[in-house]
Amino acid sequence: MKLLKRFVLVVAGLVALLLVIGLLLPSHFAISRSLVINAPAERIFSHLDKPRAWKNWSVWNRRDPAMQIDYAGPEQGVDAAWRWQSATEGNGNMTFTAVDTNRQLTYRLSFPDFGMSSTGVLRLEPAGTGTKVTWTNEGDMGNNPVNRYFGLFMDQMVGPDFEAGLSNLKEIVEKQG
C-alpha cells in the first residue's frame, strides 16, 4: 500500500510540474515560409484572394478531397470566408480581413474545437523576374498549459504544409504562364 501511495504522489508531482512548466512556456507562436514564383504578382494574387481557389493549391484540401466546405460573404476580397469540416484536417474557418491587391492578403483563422485562432498573411514582393510569396501565421495559445506545449511544435507541424501549399501554388501559376 505504501508503494502505491508513493507511486501516486510521484505521478501527481510530475503532472503538477508539467502543468507549471506549461504555464511558463510562451503562448505566442509564429510560422513563416517563402518561395519565389516565376510569374507576376497579378497572376499569383488571383489564386489567393478567392476562397474557392484555395482548394486547388492548399495541401489541406488535397489531403482530404471529401472535406465539406461552405463559403460565405463576397466571392473575393475582404470578408470573403469559408468554413470546413474534415475528419482528417479538423474543423475551422477563415475570413479575409484585409486586402492590398497584388501585394498582401491578411486573414483570420479559427479552429473552434481547439479554442484557437490566429492571423495569417500572404505577402507578395518583386524578386528578379518573379515574385516572392511569403506565408506567415501567428497566434496565441492562451493560458492552457497543454496548448502552450502544442505551440512549441507549431512551426514543425504546420511549416511543411505551408511549404507544400506554396509549391502547389507555384506549379499551378507557372503552368499558366
Image (cartoon, rainbow, N blue to C red):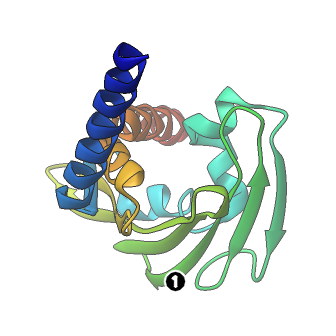
Instruction: Report helix, strand or loop for mark 1.
Output: strand
Look at 38% across and 69% down and name the residue there.
142
Q: Is residue 129 left or right of residue 102?
A: left
Q: Residues within 10 Å of mark 1 (few under 14, many from 20)?
A: some
Kind of residue at disc 1: Thr
Residue 131 place in picture, x, y as percent = 27, 53
Residue found at the far front of this picture:
1
Q: Is 9 displayed left or right of 84 in the figure?
A: left
- In this rendered view, identify the residue nearer to me: 5 or 120: 5
Task: Choose between 128 and 151: the one closer to the eye.
Answer: 151
Instruction: Identify the image quadrant of residue 10.
Output: top left
- Residue 145: percent from left, percent from top: 35, 55
Q: Can you name the residue that lies furthest to the left here?
A: 128
Front residue of this view, candidates 105 and 65: 65
Q: Is residue 118 left or right of residue 89?
A: left
Residue 122 percent coordinates (x, y): 38, 63
Task: Note whether 105 is above or below 130 in the view shown.
Answer: below
Q: Is residue 102 visible?
A: no
- Mark 1 highlights which residue? 97
Quadrant in which residue 109 is drawn: bottom right
Closer to us: 2 or 104: 2
Identified at 17% across, 59% down, the residue is 24
Q: Where does the N terminus fall, quadrant-wise? A: top left
